[in-house]
Every structure is written in C-alpha cells, then in structure tokens.
Image: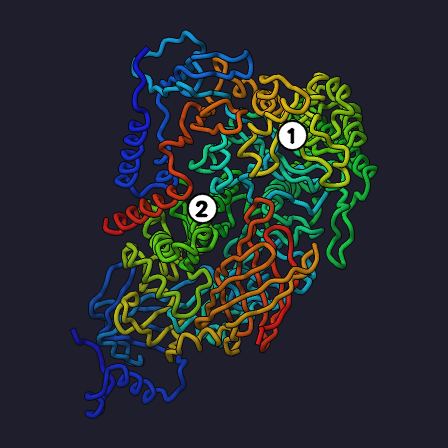
Amino acid sequence: MLSIILLPESPAMRFVTPGAAIAAAIVAASGSASAQEGTWALTNARIETVTHGVIERGTIVIRDGLIVAVGPSVTVPSDARVVDLTSKTVSPGLIDLTSTMGLANATQPAGRVAAPAPAPTPAAGPIGLEPDRTIADELKLSGAEVKSTRDVGITAVLVAPNRGAFRGMSALVPLRDSAGTSRVLRSPVALHMGFQGVGSGFGGDYPGTLLGVIAYERQAFYDAQRLGLMLDRYRAGQRGMARPEYDARLTALVPVVRGAMPVFFDANNENEIRRAVREAKEFDLKLVITGATEGFRALDALAGRPVVVSVNFPKSNEVTGWTYHWMMQHAPNDSAAADRAARSLIEGNAATLHRAGVKLALASGGTRGSDFLSNVRKAVTAGLPRDVALQAMTIRAAELVGMGEALGSIEAGKIANLVVSDGSLLGDSARVRWVFVDGVRYEVTAPAPAAARAAAAGGVATAQVAGTWSLTINSPQGAQDATLVAAQDGTNFSGTMTSAAGTAPVADGQVVGKAVTWTISITMGGQSVTISFTGEVDGNRMTGSAQIGSFGTAPFSGDRKP
Amino acid sequence: MSPPRDTAARVRKDTARTARDTITRAPRGDTAVLAAHIPPAARLVAITNATILTASHGTIEKGTILIRDGKIAAVGSNVTVPAGAQVIDGTGKYVMPGIIDAHSHSAGEAINEGTRSVTAEVRMSDVIRQDGAGLYRELAGGVTALNILHGSANTIGGQNVVVKTRWGLPVDSLIFKGAPPGIKFALGENVRQTNGSPPPGRARRYPFTRMGVEQLLRERFTAAQAYRTQWQSYEKARRDGKKGEVAPIPPRRDLQLDALVEILEGKRLVHAHSYREDEILMLLQVAKDFGFKVASFQHVLEGYKVADELAAAGSGGSTFADNWAYKLEAWDAIPYNATLMADRGVVVSINSDSDERARRLYQEAAKAMHYGGASEEAALRMITLNAAIQLGVDKMTGSIDVGKDADLAIFSGHPFAPASRVEMTLIDGRTFFDRRTAPTLESQMQQQRRVRAVTTSNGGAQ
C-alpha cells in the first residue's frame, strides 16, 4: 500500500502529533505562510469521494488547481509536496448556494439574515426589480468574510441578493483570498427571485406588497415571452419590421421564460413554496426552490423538483406557518413544549424531504461560521442520512449550478476544492484543518465563534443590547412609544416589547457588530402584523427603522434607561 | 327511517383511525395530518327531525335533509333516510344554509396594494392563506363561504376570490370552484387618501377628490376599450392570414386591462366599496356609459337614499347592520338601511368586513328584523341567499334546496335567538366544525403538537 514517497522526517518528529508534524513538514518544505499553491500529494487519507464511495486509505494528487489522480494506490509525482494525512478525512469542498457575500450594503436590501444596514438610505433605483443585475460585476469580497466562511469547509458560494422580486443573476465564486471577478467559477448561474416588494405601502413604489409582487412578476414574464418572439422575428428578417425596443431588464428575462436560464426562487414557508411552484408552472420556468424551511408541509408541491434547503432554522416563535403562528401566541404559557415540538419538525425538514424523494442541496441560508455545520449535524440527527447530507453540500449543489462535471466530488479532472478534517466532516468532533481551493491550500486557524461573527461583521465587537430601552417609532400615524426589554446571549437576544398595542415577545433578536435586528408580531385591526426592526446600537443610543408588515417603514430611535 | 346513531362517537372513531393512518403512511404533506381532524364526508348524510330554515321556501318543522355526495338530495318533512346513511339527529336543532360573508379580508396575506390607485392586475387568490384562526372562528360561527376582497385603498383594487371555509385543508382547497371572478372598486375617502398623509418627500397619490376618482375610472375604461379593439384587430388579422404568410405578432398582454375588459364583457363582477349617495350615483353612471353592471355596492351606507336607482340598475347592496358615523362619509348611515333598500327591491346582504363580526353574522342579520321589521326569512337571506346572488354562486349555495351544495349550519336554537350557538358546520356535506367532537382551537393545537412529535420521531427512525 505504501507505494508513495514520504517526506524525509527527522527522528524527533515521530513523537509529535500528526497534525503538528504535517504543519511542520509543510513549513519546512515551502517556508511560506498559510496559502500555498503547487503540486500536492495527499497520502494515507480517508477520502470521501461522494460519487465513488469512501477510500479508507488513499492518495489525491493535485496539479495546477485540478485533481489529477485519486485512489488507494496512486503514484506520487516526484515534484509533489507530500502531506501524510493519516487519520484525516478529505471531503469535497462544500458549496453554499445561499450567500450574499461581497455585495455592497448600499445595493443590498437588508434581509432577515444578512448583515443589516443601519438605516435605510434611499436607493438610486428600485431594488429588487433588476433581473439584469449581474452579481459577478459588483462583487467586493472582504478577506475576513472569505476566510471565516472557508474555515468552515465552504470552498465556493453562489452569491445573490436575498431580498426583492427580481434580484439579479447570481455568480458562483471560489473562496480564495484573492477572489476577484476574474476567478468567478460561473456567471450568470441563475435568476434569483423572491416575494419582496420594493418599498413601503404608504405612497411607496409599486409593487409594495405580496399582491403587487406576484402580479408584477407575472406581467414581466408575459412581456418577456412577447419580447422573445419579436427578437426572433427581427433576427430572422429585419427588413420591413420595426425593431423591438431595447429593454435590458426584459431581455434578461427572455432566456428565463424559455427555460434556458434557471430560476432560484427564495420560498420558505408552505404557501410561499406553493406560490413559487404555481408561478413556475404558469411560465414553464426551470425552477429551483431555495430556502424551503417549511418544505415538509409542501411535499406534494416539491415532489420531483430540485430544492436548496436552508439549515438556517427559523426560531420556533417565528411566523413561518400556522404551527409557529399558534405557538407564538401561546408561547408565554408553554414555550418549552412548543419549542421542542417545532424544533423537531424544522430540524427534520431535510430528512422529510429526502424521504419524500426530493433531490436536495443543503445550504447555509445565511447561517454564519460554525453554526452552518452544526445545524447540518442537527439535520442529520433528525434523520437525514449522513452521506446524503454530504452529497447535498457538494455534488448535488454543484449539479444545480451546472458545475457537476467540475466540482462537488473527489474525482480526477475535477477542480481541487477539498476539505481536510480530523474525523468525518459531519462527525460531532470534526475539526477542519486545511481547505484547498483551486489547489491552493489554506490553513484553518480555528477562531472562536464569537470572533468569527465579529469578523463577518467587519471586525466590530458585538454591541450590548441587554437592558430596558425607551424607543419612539415615528409611524405615518404619528409617534408611538414602545419599551424594549432585552436579555442578550452572545449574538442573540430575547425579551419583550410593550407599546399601545400590548406586549409582544421579541423574535429572532440578533446582534451583528453594532447592527441589531428583531421582529415582533402584534394584532392590528384583527390582522396579525409582523414588525421587523433594524437598528444600530451606539452606546446607550439606538436608531433604525421598522418595517410594519406590508404597511411601510417607520424610523425609530431611543435610549437605554439607566 | 333508520334510528339516529351516536354520531359523536362514530366521528371520534373515524378521526382517530384517520390520524393513525396518516402517521403510518408518512411521509406525507403536513396538511394530511391536519385533515385527519376533519372526518371525511360520508357518501350519504341525513340531518333528521330538525327545524329547517331554507331561506328560499320557508321553514320546515321536523324536517329531514338528505345529502348525497356533498349535494342536497332531498329536503322536507317526509324524506326517507336510506340505509347506511350517516345520521345527524337534529331534534331540537335549527338548520340554516351556511352563512356567506360578502365582504371579508380573512385569509389574505396582503390586503392593499396601495402603491397605485389602479391595481386591477393583482389577485387575492395569489395571497390567500389557510392558517389563520379567523377562518376557524368563522366556521364556528356557521360561515361557509367568504368573499375575500382587496382593501379599499385603490379606485380599482385587486381581483377578489370567493372561498369556502375549509379550514384545515391545504390552501388551494379553500377556493370556491365555479364562483365567477370579481374585482374590488372603491370610492370616497379611502381612495382619495383623505385620512392620512404620505411619508415626507413623497407626493400625494392621485386622485385627491371624488372628481378625480371618476376621471380615473373613465380613463381606464377608455383604455380598456382601445385595448380590446387592438386584440380584436389582431384576432381578425390572424384569422384572415393566408397560409405561408408570417403570423402577426400579438399585442402586449396587459394583465390590468385584461381584467377591465372582462368587466366590460360582463365576465367579472364589480364589488364597489362606497358610502355616499353622490359617489354611488357617479359609479352607476360610469357603469352605464361603459355598458357594465355593478354587481354589488359594498357598505353602501347611504343606499337607502338611492335604493330605486340601485334596484333599477340591478346592483346589490351589501351593508353593515348598524355602523354609523364612524367617519365623516359615514355620517348619514342609519340602521334601517338594509330593510329600506330591500323594501325597494334591492338584493341586500349584511357583511362583516371584520374577522370579529364574521363570527356572529346571524346576530347581525337579526338586527334587520329589529330595525325596519324585515321578515325572518328576508333577514336570513341577507346572510345567505342574497349574498350568494351578489357573488354569482346562488345556483350552488345560499339556500337549502335540492341540487345545491350541502353547506349548512346547525344551531342549538333559532339562529336569531340570543343564546343560540352553532353546533355543526357542514361544507359539501363534510363536517368541518362540530362543537361536540371538534377540539377547541386550544386543544386542537395541543393535538397538533403531539401528532407532529410522533410523526417526526417515527419518521426519523425509519
């Protein structure tokens, strides 16, 4: 078996831990810092090829960023730097199809999980009605963001805005330190869609609500169908025909209505999923549902369709469906039981979809840092077979973005995106040691989760929101006073908010750097209305804006009571 | 006649069995678990020995309703119950047609696309949800059908959707198949946005006055006429085209104008939110000029002043029982409105426009007897048959007549008596609410938790 060449070892090295020995060997061999290119031979590794089973003890040879050989007995080239990976596992690099990395805040509307913009600044044009927006052209990846994501084992991300109706054409980006536009793996990958309107309901822009958004999308698709017909005619014979008017947005939709360009439709709760599927059927779209956190309630609608399942599990008191709706209302009396019941359902979502025969990819849904894999492990605990989970983060994801021949498994000829871990990547005690992207090796320096979050927020320390806040919301009906009582646990906080409308529990309270987000649900005129707060904490001062259901946004500000 | 059985126990047994089946057959849509709490309809159901308020042909004492495959197969005092029918003993009970709420905003995930004054292209059917407690409470109040309308922010709002309150089933099952399409119009203060101001830096939305509302209506319908002509020319050119010739390119399909053309062609019912007599007369004139009918004026609080004009135009009036003076344009509202309009030949319904009032529309209807002296059956029709007529579903529901859907509410006493309450609500012969066996909202929720916990843990072990 050991037909490979080992690096010369000094006798002393035999007595240190394998990891340290390898690290030392690498430094000795190249003398460089953490990122290293070149020809590699990874030997004695347990290899999870994903497409051809597990090689218990094998070798992977990497040259020019590609895997050139893999197997139990592979001849190591003489110029290769050999890394003995005894007791290590190599898995294909993970692919996250739900990223917003590298999008500037100014053009990225704040979503539920994206780093929130402190205050809404009026955008130059309507956000979220831009099918022609090419994400690859505007990416500005920060080194800290790339590193904190890659350290988890993610080697490529599909980037698109996470709000809006027509969000733009996504780009698949490798997570190299110097990941610029020139390194984009594929663009455009898909049109990304959702159900968010462009502005406030109060005198804002059309479409402002779910009603308008669906009507807008429908009209745009009809217009694109007609434009396609006219363009075909015009190309066939330009004489005697008035030329079709140039419209960049509609032109971008023509391949979409022809099924040539896939649609990644962000739909999470049951009814959103059904609405997206209905729209896809009406226009024969090549549909991929993304999110699908409540997919287990819409198995009939998802059957036979590819789904990118988010593991950003909703909090049990979030209103994403009727169970949660009720549980929220009853949480004060029975929160523990409600939470357990909801948790087993939502963490079992991927397993339920898999059992129903849905071909799924798993994605972070915006879950940051080590939370991503720990949530995937929860999905495995809830019944998703471990090998299916790994496929879902690798080969299935690669196939969905049209890169199944180049990414997603450990096979000769594929791009050398690999994760080296102590133990199986989805095991409880797994620790990622190195990540290879395009054959470049990056060493993982395990950051504390809090530090990773702070890094993702731009290096700013997590603000403290604990305490009692006296806030004033300047709604179109006039100023409303509210009291927020918050208890903080790391980057999460809980509590209550009391206003003239009564007291409501704080849901999904999050702190990212100075930015703070939470939602409450109140009853207005017999209707349950969700108010989403997005603010910034500066010492004892908080300012921001509140999205009041579909009624619009209102600025708010206030101070922490001493 | 076969003896009455213990239907309560029977239903309990059925429910338990269905719930078990659902679990063993997992994985299934989660809605299947929910539906397990609603027993499937028996092919034959008989409600026996009840006082039957038909809403169309008087009251039948000690009568029987026979339901076959969800439709009313027989009704009368001398109906034979076939063997094998599920029997509901109606002794001492009152059965009335399922209540129809002609103006509801329940089950809508969005209500107002208020960004423009004309949004005829938006559809309530796109945004309905099945998961609100409001639907369940309405079911518990004997309501079997709702007209889910767009809000009143716009001159021409969105397309409505008529649903049956099949609470617990997936959202698509709510839709009342066969109900003609409709649309919401609105007039007056809400449309001209008198009672609010736009955010700083935003211009007010046109129109600001009732004059502007009329102008906008005429402008849009004129555009719809031109659009229709455009399509007619295209269809003609296509028909006349010879073989080998390049087919003409169709005009741009405009979803907003499509809806307005359907109104012009009488295929889409107009439900117009209105208060004052002047605006009602204005819309009647616009409709006359463009050759369409207004199916119903909603609220129509000054309808009593223009009842003859409404009757002559064939427009219905769907009003509140007793709301008045809650805003300036409601100043002249009176509780006699419903009966005064009905006396002049207007088809009148009483609606809720509220998840709260919708639970007790039978009490609202009773007010029409108190104010203005409507007959019992006339009052009953205001929440059943008349609403069905306004929504164009009176051939299918709204009264207890042979051939109609078995949409029924069974009361403990006369529906208009203060202490009466709904015992059972049937839709298409299926019991969607049963006070004896159906859990309350609270215990239903508890059951859901248990069932789901079992489903998930079983599933995980597979």
The answer to whether B64 is drawn above or below residue A264 in the figure is above
Work out which residue is located at the far right of the displayed protein and give it.
B211
Which residue is label 1 attached to? Answer: B321
Q: Which mark is residue A185?
A: none
Q: Nearer the viewer, mark 2 or mark 1?
A: 1
State whether residue A526 is above or below residue B427. Answer: below
Q: Quadrant of residue A130?
A: bottom right
Q: Which residue shows up at 46% across the image and 51% down it?
A: A329
**Subunit under mark 2:** A
User: Tag 1, which secondary structure?
Assistant: loop
**Amino acid type, residue under disc 2 in the picture:** Trp
Residue under the image location 69 percent in, 42 percent down: B153
Q: Marks 2 and 1: CB-CB under 8 Å?
A: no
User: What chain does badge 1 belong to?
Assistant: B
In this picture, residue A408 sits left or right of residue B143: left
State the quadrant of the N terminus of chain B: top left
Q: Neighbour class for label 2 at 10 Å: few (<14), some, many (≥20)?
A: some
Residue under disc 2 on the same chain as residue under disc 1: no
Q: Which mark is residue A322?
A: 2
Q: Secondary structure at mark 2?
A: helix
**Residue beneath the point at 79% across and 37% down:** B213
Most distant residue in the top direction: B78
B84 on left or right of A215: left
Q: Give percent across and percent down for residue B378.
A: 61, 18
Mark pair 2, 1: CA separation: 32 Å
Question: Does any portion of residue B250 appear in the rendered image?
Answer: no
